[in-house]
Amino acid sequence: CSPKVYTMMPRITSHYTIFPRDKDPRWEGVEMERFADEADVVIVGGGPAGLSAAIRLKQLAKEQEKELRVCLVEKASQIGAHTLSGACLEPSALNELFPDWKERGAPLNTPVTEDLFSILTEKYRIPVPMLPGLPMNNHGNYIVRLGHFVHWLGEQAEELGVEIYPGYAAAEVLFHEDGSVKGIATNDVGIAKDGSPKDVFERGMELHAKVTLFGEGCHGHLAKQLYRQFNLRENCEPQTYAIGLKELWVIDEKKWRPGRVEHSVGWPLNRNTYGGSFLYHLNEGEPLVALGFVVGLDYTNPYLSPFREFQRWKHHPFVAKTLEGGDRIAYGARALNEGGYQCLPKVTFPGGMLIGCSPGFMNVPKIKGTHTAMKSGMLAAEAIFPKVTAEDPASETAGLHIPEYEDNLKKSWIWKELYAVRNIRPSFHNYFGLYGGMIYTGVFYWILRGKEPWTLKHAGLDSAQLKPAKECTPIEYPKPDGKLSFDLLSSVALSGTNHEGDQPPHLTLKDDSIPVANNLAIYDGPEQRFCPAGVYEYVPLETGEGMRLQINAQNCVHCKTCDIKDPSQNINWVVPEGSGGPAYNGL
Protein backbone atom coordinates (compact mmCIF):
# COMPACT_ATOMS: atom_id res chain seq x y z
CA CYS A 1 0.00 0.00 0.00
CA SER A 2 1.50 3.35 -0.96
CA PRO A 3 0.99 6.16 1.60
CA LYS A 4 -1.39 7.88 -0.88
CA VAL A 5 -3.87 5.01 -0.67
CA TYR A 6 -4.30 5.64 3.07
CA THR A 7 -6.03 8.96 2.39
CA MET A 8 -7.84 8.30 -0.89
CA MET A 9 -10.47 5.69 -0.06
CA PRO A 10 -12.61 5.33 3.08
CA ARG A 11 -10.79 2.41 4.68
CA ILE A 12 -12.71 0.05 6.94
CA THR A 13 -9.87 -2.30 7.86
CA SER A 14 -6.67 -0.86 9.32
CA HIS A 15 -5.46 -3.83 11.35
CA TYR A 16 -1.84 -4.97 11.01
CA THR A 17 -2.90 -8.56 10.29
CA ILE A 18 -4.24 -7.26 6.95
CA PHE A 19 -1.83 -4.33 6.39
CA PRO A 20 1.58 -5.40 7.75
CA ARG A 21 3.45 -2.76 9.72
CA ASP A 22 6.82 -3.45 8.11
CA LYS A 23 5.39 -2.06 4.85
CA ASP A 24 3.79 0.99 6.53
CA PRO A 25 5.99 4.14 6.65
CA ARG A 26 4.25 5.33 9.85
CA TRP A 27 5.88 2.44 11.74
CA GLU A 28 9.44 3.18 10.66
CA GLY A 29 11.79 3.37 13.63
CA VAL A 30 9.21 2.12 16.21
CA GLU A 31 10.76 -0.27 18.78
CA MET A 32 9.22 -3.72 18.18
CA GLU A 33 11.24 -5.81 20.66
CA ARG A 34 9.10 -7.92 23.00
CA PHE A 35 9.79 -9.01 26.57
CA ALA A 36 9.70 -12.82 26.87
CA ASP A 37 8.92 -15.02 29.88
CA GLU A 38 9.22 -18.80 30.32
CA ALA A 39 6.74 -21.24 31.88
CA ASP A 40 6.34 -25.01 31.80
CA VAL A 41 2.78 -24.79 30.49
CA VAL A 42 0.91 -21.80 29.04
CA ILE A 43 -2.88 -21.91 28.76
CA VAL A 44 -4.90 -19.62 26.49
CA GLY A 45 -8.39 -18.96 27.85
CA GLY A 46 -9.77 -18.94 31.38
CA GLY A 47 -12.92 -20.95 30.76
CA PRO A 48 -13.94 -24.34 32.18
CA ALA A 49 -11.39 -26.26 30.03
CA GLY A 50 -8.38 -23.98 30.60
CA LEU A 51 -8.95 -23.66 34.33
CA SER A 52 -9.58 -27.40 34.80
CA ALA A 53 -6.31 -28.15 32.97
CA ALA A 54 -4.43 -25.64 35.12
CA ILE A 55 -5.94 -27.01 38.34
CA ARG A 56 -5.24 -30.63 37.42
CA LEU A 57 -1.59 -29.82 36.54
CA LYS A 58 -1.04 -28.14 39.90
CA GLN A 59 -2.83 -30.96 41.76
CA LEU A 60 -0.46 -33.49 40.15
CA ALA A 61 2.57 -31.30 40.90
CA LYS A 62 1.50 -31.09 44.56
CA GLU A 63 0.87 -34.85 44.83
CA GLN A 64 4.29 -35.65 43.35
CA GLU A 65 6.11 -32.73 44.97
CA LYS A 66 7.33 -31.29 41.67
CA GLU A 67 7.87 -27.67 40.71
CA LEU A 68 5.67 -26.63 37.81
CA ARG A 69 5.02 -23.13 36.48
CA VAL A 70 1.57 -22.80 34.87
CA CYS A 71 0.51 -19.45 33.34
CA LEU A 72 -2.99 -18.74 32.05
CA VAL A 73 -3.99 -15.70 29.95
CA GLU A 74 -7.59 -14.52 29.58
CA LYS A 75 -8.82 -11.68 27.34
CA ALA A 76 -11.63 -10.63 29.71
CA SER A 77 -10.87 -8.05 32.40
CA GLN A 78 -11.73 -10.69 35.00
CA ILE A 79 -12.23 -14.44 34.95
CA GLY A 80 -15.82 -15.24 33.94
CA ALA A 81 -16.62 -11.84 32.37
CA HIS A 82 -16.73 -13.28 28.83
CA THR A 83 -18.38 -16.56 29.84
CA LEU A 84 -21.92 -17.13 28.61
CA SER A 85 -23.90 -20.35 28.77
CA GLY A 86 -27.39 -21.61 29.72
CA ALA A 87 -26.30 -23.26 31.90
CA CYS A 88 -27.34 -26.65 33.10
CA LEU A 89 -24.24 -28.28 34.53
CA GLU A 90 -23.71 -32.02 34.67
CA PRO A 91 -21.34 -32.39 37.66
CA SER A 92 -19.45 -35.50 36.44
CA ALA A 93 -16.12 -33.77 35.67
CA LEU A 94 -16.38 -31.48 38.70
CA ASN A 95 -16.83 -34.53 40.97
CA GLU A 96 -13.56 -35.90 39.57
CA LEU A 97 -11.66 -32.60 39.83
CA PHE A 98 -12.87 -31.58 43.30
CA PRO A 99 -14.78 -34.37 45.10
CA ASP A 100 -15.20 -31.84 47.96
CA TRP A 101 -16.64 -29.05 45.77
CA LYS A 102 -19.56 -28.50 48.16
CA GLU A 103 -17.22 -27.78 51.08
CA ARG A 104 -15.17 -25.50 48.83
CA GLY A 105 -18.25 -23.39 48.17
CA ALA A 106 -18.78 -24.07 44.45
CA PRO A 107 -21.76 -21.93 43.33
CA LEU A 108 -24.03 -24.85 42.39
CA ASN A 109 -27.09 -23.53 44.21
CA THR A 110 -29.93 -24.93 42.13
CA PRO A 111 -30.41 -28.69 41.70
CA VAL A 112 -32.84 -29.44 38.85
CA THR A 113 -36.23 -30.40 40.29
CA GLU A 114 -38.45 -30.41 37.20
CA ASP A 115 -37.96 -30.90 33.43
CA LEU A 116 -40.45 -29.53 30.88
CA PHE A 117 -40.12 -29.98 27.12
CA SER A 118 -42.51 -28.43 24.61
CA ILE A 119 -43.20 -28.14 20.92
CA LEU A 120 -44.60 -24.64 20.39
CA THR A 121 -47.07 -23.58 17.73
CA GLU A 122 -47.86 -19.89 17.37
CA LYS A 123 -50.48 -19.93 20.12
CA TYR A 124 -50.24 -23.34 21.80
CA ARG A 125 -47.87 -25.70 23.55
CA ILE A 126 -47.64 -29.45 22.90
CA PRO A 127 -45.97 -31.11 25.93
CA VAL A 128 -43.38 -33.82 25.18
CA PRO A 129 -42.69 -36.39 27.92
CA MET A 130 -39.10 -36.38 29.22
CA LEU A 131 -38.36 -40.09 29.38
CA PRO A 132 -35.43 -41.25 31.51
CA GLY A 133 -32.46 -41.92 29.22
CA LEU A 134 -33.28 -39.17 26.73
CA PRO A 135 -30.32 -36.77 26.40
CA MET A 136 -32.43 -33.80 27.53
CA ASN A 137 -33.28 -35.39 30.88
CA ASN A 138 -31.64 -33.23 33.57
CA HIS A 139 -32.11 -35.35 36.67
CA GLY A 140 -29.01 -34.90 38.90
CA ASN A 141 -27.83 -31.72 37.16
CA TYR A 142 -27.55 -28.16 38.48
CA ILE A 143 -28.68 -24.84 37.01
CA VAL A 144 -25.71 -22.48 37.34
CA ARG A 145 -24.59 -19.03 36.30
CA LEU A 146 -21.54 -20.24 34.43
CA GLY A 147 -19.63 -16.96 34.76
CA HIS A 148 -19.81 -17.32 38.56
CA PHE A 149 -18.79 -20.98 38.40
CA VAL A 150 -15.80 -20.13 36.20
CA HIS A 151 -14.83 -17.29 38.57
CA TRP A 152 -14.88 -19.82 41.42
CA LEU A 153 -12.69 -22.21 39.38
CA GLY A 154 -10.27 -19.28 38.90
CA GLU A 155 -10.04 -18.82 42.68
CA GLN A 156 -9.33 -22.54 43.15
CA ALA A 157 -6.60 -22.36 40.49
CA GLU A 158 -4.93 -19.35 42.12
CA GLU A 159 -4.97 -21.07 45.53
CA LEU A 160 -3.03 -23.94 43.91
CA GLY A 161 -0.45 -21.52 42.52
CA VAL A 162 -1.59 -21.05 38.93
CA GLU A 163 -0.53 -17.63 37.60
CA ILE A 164 -3.62 -16.03 36.04
CA TYR A 165 -3.37 -12.95 33.84
CA PRO A 166 -6.83 -11.52 33.08
CA GLY A 167 -6.99 -8.60 30.64
CA TYR A 168 -4.31 -10.13 28.41
CA ALA A 169 -5.48 -11.41 25.03
CA ALA A 170 -3.36 -14.00 23.23
CA ALA A 171 -2.92 -12.35 19.83
CA GLU A 172 -0.34 -14.52 18.11
CA VAL A 173 1.02 -18.09 18.10
CA LEU A 174 4.83 -18.26 18.30
CA PHE A 175 6.79 -21.03 16.58
CA HIS A 176 10.23 -22.62 17.03
CA GLU A 177 12.48 -22.90 13.99
CA ASP A 178 11.48 -26.58 13.67
CA GLY A 179 7.83 -25.51 13.22
CA SER A 180 6.61 -26.60 16.66
CA VAL A 181 4.64 -24.18 18.86
CA LYS A 182 6.82 -22.12 21.18
CA GLY A 183 4.09 -20.19 23.02
CA ILE A 184 1.98 -17.09 22.46
CA ALA A 185 2.32 -13.32 22.37
CA THR A 186 -0.22 -11.05 24.04
CA ASN A 187 -1.84 -8.10 22.27
CA ASP A 188 -0.02 -4.84 21.57
CA VAL A 189 -1.62 -1.71 23.04
CA GLY A 190 -1.61 1.90 21.88
CA ILE A 191 -2.44 1.56 18.18
CA ALA A 192 -4.76 4.26 16.76
CA LYS A 193 -7.93 3.50 14.80
CA ASP A 194 -6.14 4.27 11.51
CA GLY A 195 -3.45 1.67 12.31
CA SER A 196 -0.71 4.13 13.29
CA PRO A 197 1.28 3.95 16.55
CA LYS A 198 0.16 6.25 19.39
CA ASP A 199 2.68 7.83 21.76
CA VAL A 200 1.72 5.22 24.36
CA PHE A 201 2.31 2.25 22.00
CA GLU A 202 3.56 -0.83 23.83
CA ARG A 203 4.40 -4.26 22.48
CA GLY A 204 2.69 -7.29 23.98
CA MET A 205 4.80 -9.85 25.80
CA GLU A 206 5.86 -13.34 24.77
CA LEU A 207 5.06 -16.35 26.92
CA HIS A 208 7.12 -19.42 26.00
CA ALA A 209 6.30 -22.94 27.21
CA LYS A 210 7.13 -26.58 26.69
CA VAL A 211 3.44 -27.07 25.85
CA THR A 212 0.74 -24.49 25.07
CA LEU A 213 -2.95 -25.36 25.60
CA PHE A 214 -5.51 -23.54 23.49
CA GLY A 215 -8.85 -23.29 25.27
CA GLU A 216 -10.24 -20.20 23.54
CA GLY A 217 -13.81 -21.45 23.38
CA CYS A 218 -15.93 -21.92 20.28
CA HIS A 219 -14.24 -20.82 17.02
CA GLY A 220 -11.06 -19.52 18.63
CA HIS A 221 -9.04 -17.25 16.35
CA LEU A 222 -5.67 -18.86 17.19
CA ALA A 223 -7.16 -22.34 16.72
CA LYS A 224 -8.20 -21.26 13.21
CA GLN A 225 -4.52 -20.61 12.42
CA LEU A 226 -3.43 -23.89 14.00
CA TYR A 227 -5.96 -25.87 11.90
CA ARG A 228 -4.27 -24.50 8.77
CA GLN A 229 -0.69 -24.70 10.04
CA PHE A 230 -0.88 -28.35 11.14
CA ASN A 231 -3.71 -29.49 8.85
CA LEU A 232 -5.71 -30.61 11.90
CA ARG A 233 -9.05 -30.80 10.08
CA GLU A 234 -8.04 -33.02 7.15
CA ASN A 235 -9.91 -36.07 8.49
CA CYS A 236 -13.06 -34.48 9.89
CA GLU A 237 -16.10 -32.62 8.62
CA PRO A 238 -16.23 -28.80 8.79
CA GLN A 239 -17.49 -27.64 12.19
CA THR A 240 -21.12 -26.51 12.25
CA TYR A 241 -22.35 -23.93 14.76
CA ALA A 242 -25.30 -22.19 16.38
CA ILE A 243 -25.74 -18.80 17.99
CA GLY A 244 -27.09 -18.68 21.54
CA LEU A 245 -28.68 -15.46 22.83
CA LYS A 246 -29.44 -15.09 26.50
CA GLU A 247 -31.11 -12.78 29.03
CA LEU A 248 -31.45 -12.74 32.80
CA TRP A 249 -34.74 -11.57 34.29
CA VAL A 250 -35.99 -10.88 37.78
CA ILE A 251 -39.60 -12.10 37.73
CA ASP A 252 -42.65 -11.91 39.97
CA GLU A 253 -42.00 -14.19 42.95
CA LYS A 254 -45.39 -15.90 42.53
CA LYS A 255 -44.25 -17.28 39.15
CA TRP A 256 -40.82 -18.43 40.33
CA ARG A 257 -40.17 -22.21 40.48
CA PRO A 258 -36.52 -22.69 41.58
CA GLY A 259 -35.06 -25.79 39.92
CA ARG A 260 -37.45 -25.86 36.98
CA VAL A 261 -35.86 -26.40 33.54
CA GLU A 262 -37.94 -25.63 30.44
CA HIS A 263 -36.94 -26.27 26.81
CA SER A 264 -38.88 -25.79 23.61
CA VAL A 265 -38.60 -26.30 19.86
CA GLY A 266 -40.86 -25.13 17.05
CA TRP A 267 -42.37 -21.63 16.81
CA PRO A 268 -41.15 -19.01 15.89
CA LEU A 269 -38.72 -21.05 13.69
CA ASN A 270 -39.96 -23.07 10.72
CA ARG A 271 -39.43 -26.84 10.66
CA ASN A 272 -36.24 -26.55 8.54
CA THR A 273 -34.44 -24.11 10.84
CA TYR A 274 -32.72 -25.89 13.72
CA GLY A 275 -33.08 -24.19 17.08
CA GLY A 276 -34.93 -23.95 20.35
CA SER A 277 -35.23 -22.21 23.66
CA PHE A 278 -34.37 -22.61 27.32
CA LEU A 279 -35.83 -21.05 30.46
CA TYR A 280 -34.22 -21.96 33.78
CA HIS A 281 -35.46 -20.91 37.24
CA LEU A 282 -32.40 -20.17 39.40
CA ASN A 283 -32.30 -20.39 43.19
CA GLU A 284 -29.97 -17.46 43.93
CA GLY A 285 -31.86 -15.65 46.68
CA GLU A 286 -34.02 -13.58 44.33
CA PRO A 287 -36.58 -14.74 41.72
CA LEU A 288 -34.15 -14.98 38.80
CA VAL A 289 -34.68 -16.79 35.51
CA ALA A 290 -32.12 -17.35 32.77
CA LEU A 291 -33.68 -17.63 29.35
CA GLY A 292 -32.33 -17.90 25.87
CA PHE A 293 -32.75 -18.89 22.28
CA VAL A 294 -30.44 -20.95 20.05
CA VAL A 295 -30.50 -20.87 16.24
CA GLY A 296 -28.40 -23.25 14.10
CA LEU A 297 -26.11 -21.20 11.85
CA ASP A 298 -26.84 -23.51 8.92
CA TYR A 299 -30.08 -21.55 8.31
CA THR A 300 -30.71 -20.57 4.67
CA ASN A 301 -32.83 -17.38 4.67
CA PRO A 302 -30.59 -14.27 4.77
CA TYR A 303 -33.51 -12.26 6.19
CA LEU A 304 -33.54 -14.30 9.42
CA SER A 305 -32.41 -12.44 12.54
CA PRO A 306 -31.62 -14.73 15.50
CA PHE A 307 -31.96 -11.75 17.87
CA ARG A 308 -35.44 -10.88 16.62
CA GLU A 309 -36.55 -14.53 16.67
CA PHE A 310 -35.54 -14.58 20.35
CA GLN A 311 -37.49 -11.37 21.07
CA ARG A 312 -40.54 -12.73 19.25
CA TRP A 313 -40.41 -16.07 21.12
CA LYS A 314 -40.89 -14.28 24.46
CA HIS A 315 -44.39 -13.26 23.32
CA HIS A 316 -45.59 -16.88 23.16
CA PRO A 317 -48.39 -17.22 25.74
CA PHE A 318 -46.53 -20.05 27.54
CA VAL A 319 -43.37 -17.90 27.92
CA ALA A 320 -44.95 -14.48 28.37
CA LYS A 321 -46.92 -15.59 31.45
CA THR A 322 -43.60 -16.19 33.30
CA LEU A 323 -42.02 -12.88 32.25
CA GLU A 324 -44.93 -10.42 32.48
CA GLY A 325 -44.28 -7.88 35.20
CA GLY A 326 -40.59 -8.85 35.39
CA ASP A 327 -37.43 -6.88 34.67
CA ARG A 328 -34.66 -7.77 32.24
CA ILE A 329 -31.26 -7.22 33.88
CA ALA A 330 -28.69 -8.78 31.50
CA TYR A 331 -28.17 -9.72 27.85
CA GLY A 332 -25.44 -11.48 25.88
CA ALA A 333 -24.71 -13.88 23.02
CA ARG A 334 -22.12 -16.47 22.01
CA ALA A 335 -21.63 -18.97 19.20
CA LEU A 336 -21.55 -22.66 20.13
CA ASN A 337 -20.34 -25.81 18.35
CA GLU A 338 -22.96 -28.19 17.02
CA GLY A 339 -20.85 -30.56 14.95
CA GLY A 340 -20.11 -33.11 17.65
CA TYR A 341 -18.27 -36.34 16.89
CA GLN A 342 -18.05 -35.96 13.08
CA CYS A 343 -16.35 -32.55 13.36
CA LEU A 344 -13.66 -33.26 15.95
CA PRO A 345 -10.24 -32.22 14.60
CA LYS A 346 -6.87 -33.68 15.52
CA VAL A 347 -6.22 -32.12 18.95
CA THR A 348 -2.46 -32.59 19.38
CA PHE A 349 0.44 -31.11 17.41
CA PRO A 350 4.10 -30.34 18.17
CA GLY A 351 4.14 -27.91 21.09
CA GLY A 352 0.43 -27.71 21.74
CA MET A 353 -3.08 -29.07 22.24
CA LEU A 354 -6.69 -27.99 21.75
CA ILE A 355 -9.08 -28.33 24.68
CA GLY A 356 -12.75 -27.62 25.45
CA CYS A 357 -15.13 -25.89 23.08
CA SER A 358 -12.26 -24.87 20.81
CA PRO A 359 -12.14 -28.32 19.15
CA GLY A 360 -15.82 -28.75 20.07
CA PHE A 361 -16.72 -31.36 22.70
CA MET A 362 -20.26 -30.10 23.21
CA ASN A 363 -22.98 -32.75 23.49
CA VAL A 364 -25.56 -31.09 21.23
CA PRO A 365 -28.83 -32.88 22.13
CA LYS A 366 -27.93 -32.52 25.82
CA ILE A 367 -27.03 -28.85 25.13
CA LYS A 368 -24.12 -29.27 27.49
CA GLY A 369 -20.44 -28.76 26.94
CA THR A 370 -19.08 -27.68 30.32
CA HIS A 371 -18.56 -31.19 31.72
CA THR A 372 -16.85 -32.39 28.52
CA ALA A 373 -14.73 -29.20 28.29
CA MET A 374 -13.55 -29.66 31.88
CA LYS A 375 -12.78 -33.34 31.34
CA SER A 376 -10.79 -32.58 28.16
CA GLY A 377 -8.66 -30.09 30.12
CA MET A 378 -8.08 -32.66 32.86
CA LEU A 379 -7.11 -35.36 30.33
CA ALA A 380 -4.71 -32.92 28.66
CA ALA A 381 -3.11 -32.14 32.04
CA GLU A 382 -2.71 -35.84 32.86
CA ALA A 383 -0.99 -36.48 29.51
CA ILE A 384 1.27 -33.41 29.83
CA PHE A 385 2.42 -33.76 33.42
CA PRO A 386 4.78 -36.77 33.10
CA LYS A 387 6.32 -35.27 29.95
CA VAL A 388 6.99 -31.73 31.20
CA THR A 389 8.44 -32.98 34.47
CA ALA A 390 10.65 -35.69 32.90
CA GLU A 391 14.44 -35.18 32.90
CA ASP A 392 14.47 -36.17 29.24
CA PRO A 393 11.04 -35.78 27.59
CA ALA A 394 12.26 -37.66 24.46
CA SER A 395 10.62 -35.21 22.05
CA GLU A 396 11.64 -34.87 18.42
CA THR A 397 10.62 -31.20 18.42
CA ALA A 398 11.47 -28.23 20.67
CA GLY A 399 7.80 -27.87 21.59
CA LEU A 400 6.63 -31.18 23.12
CA HIS A 401 4.27 -33.30 21.02
CA ILE A 402 2.03 -35.36 23.32
CA PRO A 403 -0.28 -37.60 21.26
CA GLU A 404 -1.21 -39.51 24.45
CA TYR A 405 -3.82 -36.80 25.11
CA GLU A 406 -5.76 -37.80 22.00
CA ASP A 407 -5.44 -41.51 22.92
CA ASN A 408 -6.79 -40.76 26.41
CA LEU A 409 -9.72 -38.81 24.95
CA LYS A 410 -10.69 -41.76 22.77
CA LYS A 411 -10.73 -44.05 25.83
CA SER A 412 -12.70 -41.59 27.98
CA TRP A 413 -16.40 -41.11 28.59
CA ILE A 414 -16.30 -37.95 26.39
CA TRP A 415 -15.78 -40.09 23.29
CA LYS A 416 -18.48 -42.63 24.23
CA GLU A 417 -20.95 -39.84 24.98
CA LEU A 418 -20.33 -37.92 21.74
CA TYR A 419 -20.35 -41.09 19.63
CA ALA A 420 -23.73 -42.18 21.02
CA VAL A 421 -25.45 -38.88 20.05
CA ARG A 422 -23.52 -38.31 16.79
CA ASN A 423 -26.54 -38.71 14.48
CA ILE A 424 -29.10 -36.61 16.34
CA ARG A 425 -28.13 -33.16 15.02
CA PRO A 426 -27.54 -34.22 11.37
CA SER A 427 -30.81 -36.22 11.37
CA PHE A 428 -32.61 -32.84 11.15
CA HIS A 429 -31.45 -32.51 7.51
CA ASN A 430 -34.51 -34.16 5.99
CA TYR A 431 -37.75 -33.08 4.34
CA PHE A 432 -39.61 -33.10 7.68
CA GLY A 433 -36.81 -31.12 9.38
CA LEU A 434 -37.41 -30.79 13.10
CA TYR A 435 -40.09 -33.49 13.24
CA GLY A 436 -38.02 -36.01 11.28
CA GLY A 437 -35.12 -35.36 13.65
CA MET A 438 -37.30 -35.89 16.72
CA ILE A 439 -38.64 -39.19 15.33
CA TYR A 440 -35.05 -40.29 14.57
CA THR A 441 -34.00 -39.45 18.15
CA GLY A 442 -36.91 -41.39 19.61
CA VAL A 443 -36.25 -44.50 17.54
CA PHE A 444 -32.48 -44.68 17.21
CA TYR A 445 -31.27 -42.96 20.34
CA TRP A 446 -33.86 -43.93 22.90
CA ILE A 447 -34.14 -47.52 21.71
CA LEU A 448 -30.68 -48.27 20.25
CA ARG A 449 -28.63 -45.77 22.34
CA GLY A 450 -26.70 -44.58 19.28
CA LYS A 451 -25.52 -48.08 18.33
CA GLU A 452 -26.85 -47.83 14.74
CA PRO A 453 -24.06 -48.89 12.33
CA TRP A 454 -24.08 -45.64 10.27
CA THR A 455 -22.89 -42.08 10.83
CA LEU A 456 -24.86 -39.25 9.23
CA LYS A 457 -23.19 -36.21 7.66
CA HIS A 458 -23.80 -32.51 8.35
CA ALA A 459 -24.68 -30.08 5.55
CA GLY A 460 -21.17 -28.56 5.25
CA LEU A 461 -19.89 -25.07 6.07
CA ASP A 462 -22.50 -22.80 7.67
CA SER A 463 -21.18 -19.91 5.57
CA ALA A 464 -22.19 -21.76 2.38
CA GLN A 465 -25.84 -22.34 3.36
CA LEU A 466 -27.44 -18.94 2.71
CA LYS A 467 -29.61 -18.63 -0.39
CA PRO A 468 -29.56 -15.40 -2.44
CA ALA A 469 -32.05 -12.85 -1.09
CA LYS A 470 -34.12 -12.89 -4.29
CA GLU A 471 -34.97 -16.57 -3.67
CA CYS A 472 -36.18 -15.91 -0.11
CA THR A 473 -39.12 -14.25 1.58
CA PRO A 474 -38.30 -11.28 3.84
CA ILE A 475 -39.36 -11.95 7.44
CA GLU A 476 -41.69 -9.40 9.01
CA TYR A 477 -40.71 -9.04 12.67
CA PRO A 478 -43.05 -7.28 15.11
CA LYS A 479 -41.81 -4.06 16.72
CA PRO A 480 -40.47 -4.59 20.27
CA ASP A 481 -42.92 -3.52 22.97
CA GLY A 482 -40.29 -2.46 25.54
CA LYS A 483 -41.82 -4.83 28.13
CA LEU A 484 -41.15 -8.36 26.87
CA SER A 485 -39.22 -7.60 23.68
CA PHE A 486 -36.53 -4.97 23.14
CA ASP A 487 -34.42 -3.38 20.44
CA LEU A 488 -30.83 -4.36 19.78
CA LEU A 489 -28.99 -1.35 21.16
CA SER A 490 -30.78 -1.28 24.52
CA SER A 491 -29.93 -5.00 24.75
CA VAL A 492 -26.22 -4.51 23.99
CA ALA A 493 -26.15 -1.79 26.68
CA LEU A 494 -27.06 -4.52 29.23
CA SER A 495 -24.03 -6.61 28.23
CA GLY A 496 -21.59 -4.07 29.72
CA THR A 497 -19.62 -4.20 26.46
CA ASN A 498 -16.76 -1.72 26.20
CA HIS A 499 -13.66 -1.37 24.02
CA GLU A 500 -10.99 1.31 23.76
CA GLY A 501 -12.49 3.41 20.93
CA ASP A 502 -9.26 4.55 19.31
CA GLN A 503 -7.93 1.19 18.08
CA PRO A 504 -8.15 -0.57 14.70
CA PRO A 505 -11.45 -2.48 14.34
CA HIS A 506 -10.77 -6.08 15.43
CA LEU A 507 -13.39 -7.29 12.95
CA THR A 508 -11.05 -7.27 9.99
CA LEU A 509 -12.01 -7.62 6.33
CA LYS A 510 -9.67 -9.39 3.93
CA ASP A 511 -11.11 -7.10 1.24
CA ASP A 512 -13.04 -3.92 2.11
CA SER A 513 -15.00 -3.96 -1.17
CA ILE A 514 -16.61 -7.39 -0.77
CA PRO A 515 -19.40 -6.54 1.72
CA VAL A 516 -21.15 -4.15 -0.67
CA ALA A 517 -20.28 -6.01 -3.89
CA ASN A 518 -21.24 -9.48 -2.63
CA ASN A 519 -23.00 -9.59 0.75
CA LEU A 520 -25.26 -6.60 0.13
CA ALA A 521 -25.79 -7.20 -3.59
CA ILE A 522 -26.61 -10.92 -3.36
CA TYR A 523 -27.72 -11.57 0.23
CA ASP A 524 -29.11 -8.15 1.25
CA GLY A 525 -26.42 -7.64 3.90
CA PRO A 526 -27.08 -10.57 6.27
CA GLU A 527 -24.39 -9.40 8.76
CA GLN A 528 -26.83 -6.64 9.83
CA ARG A 529 -29.15 -9.41 11.00
CA PHE A 530 -26.96 -12.29 12.23
CA CYS A 531 -24.80 -10.06 14.46
CA PRO A 532 -26.44 -9.98 17.93
CA ALA A 533 -24.78 -6.67 18.87
CA GLY A 534 -25.37 -4.18 16.04
CA VAL A 535 -21.74 -4.19 14.91
CA TYR A 536 -22.49 -4.16 11.18
CA GLU A 537 -24.69 -1.64 9.41
CA TYR A 538 -24.97 -0.50 5.82
CA VAL A 539 -25.24 3.28 5.60
CA PRO A 540 -25.54 5.60 2.58
CA LEU A 541 -22.26 6.92 1.16
CA GLU A 542 -21.53 10.55 1.98
CA THR A 543 -21.86 11.32 -1.75
CA GLY A 544 -25.45 10.07 -1.52
CA GLU A 545 -24.99 7.33 -4.11
CA GLY A 546 -24.73 3.71 -3.00
CA MET A 547 -24.01 2.20 0.39
CA ARG A 548 -20.99 1.41 2.53
CA LEU A 549 -20.50 -0.99 5.43
CA GLN A 550 -19.94 0.60 8.82
CA ILE A 551 -18.35 -1.52 11.55
CA ASN A 552 -19.20 -0.48 15.13
CA ALA A 553 -16.46 -2.60 16.67
CA GLN A 554 -16.99 -1.18 20.17
CA ASN A 555 -20.39 -3.02 20.31
CA CYS A 556 -18.85 -6.47 19.73
CA VAL A 557 -19.71 -9.11 22.35
CA HIS A 558 -17.04 -11.54 21.04
CA CYS A 559 -19.62 -14.12 19.94
CA LYS A 560 -17.72 -15.02 16.68
CA THR A 561 -20.94 -15.44 14.65
CA CYS A 562 -19.79 -13.08 11.87
CA ASP A 563 -16.55 -14.99 11.33
CA ILE A 564 -18.59 -18.21 11.02
CA LYS A 565 -21.62 -17.13 8.98
CA ASP A 566 -20.24 -14.48 6.59
CA PRO A 567 -21.13 -15.94 3.16
CA SER A 568 -17.97 -14.42 1.61
CA GLN A 569 -15.72 -15.68 4.43
CA ASN A 570 -14.15 -12.22 4.29
CA ILE A 571 -14.47 -11.36 8.01
CA ASN A 572 -11.61 -12.45 10.26
CA TRP A 573 -12.23 -11.85 13.97
CA VAL A 574 -9.01 -11.04 15.84
CA VAL A 575 -8.53 -10.02 19.47
CA PRO A 576 -8.94 -6.37 20.42
CA GLU A 577 -6.86 -4.81 23.19
CA GLY A 578 -6.99 -6.96 26.33
CA SER A 579 -9.97 -6.47 28.69
CA GLY A 580 -12.16 -5.14 25.85
CA GLY A 581 -15.50 -6.87 25.28
CA PRO A 582 -18.55 -7.69 27.37
CA ALA A 583 -18.64 -7.48 31.16
CA TYR A 584 -21.04 -10.30 31.95
CA ASN A 585 -21.91 -10.84 35.59
CA GLY A 586 -22.74 -14.50 35.91
CA LEU A 587 -24.09 -15.31 32.45
Image (cartoon, rainbow, N blue to C red):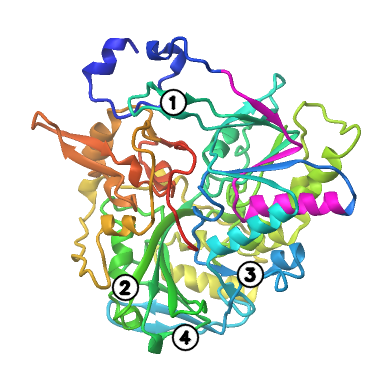
Residue 280 visible in image = yes
CA gap, disc 3 to disc 4? 20 Å
User: Mark 1 = which residue?
Assistant: 200
**Element type where label 4 sits in the image:** loop
CA gap, disc 2 to disc 3? 27 Å
* Quadrant in which the N terminus is drawn: top left
**Element type where label 3 sits in the image:** loop
User: Mark 2 = which residue?
Assistant: 314
**Farthest residue in the front direction?**
199
CA gap, disc 3 to disc 1? 46 Å
Of callouts 2 and 1, the N-terminal one: 1
Of callouts 2 and 4, the N-terminal one: 4
Quarter of the view holding residue 319: bottom left
**Element type where label 2 sits in the image:** loop
Q: Residue 90 bears which disc, if any?
A: 3
Q: Could you say which is closer to the camera, residue 531 or residue 258?
A: 258
**Element type where label 1 sits in the image:** strand
Residue range highlighted in magenta: 33-62
User: Mark 4 = which residue?
Assistant: 257
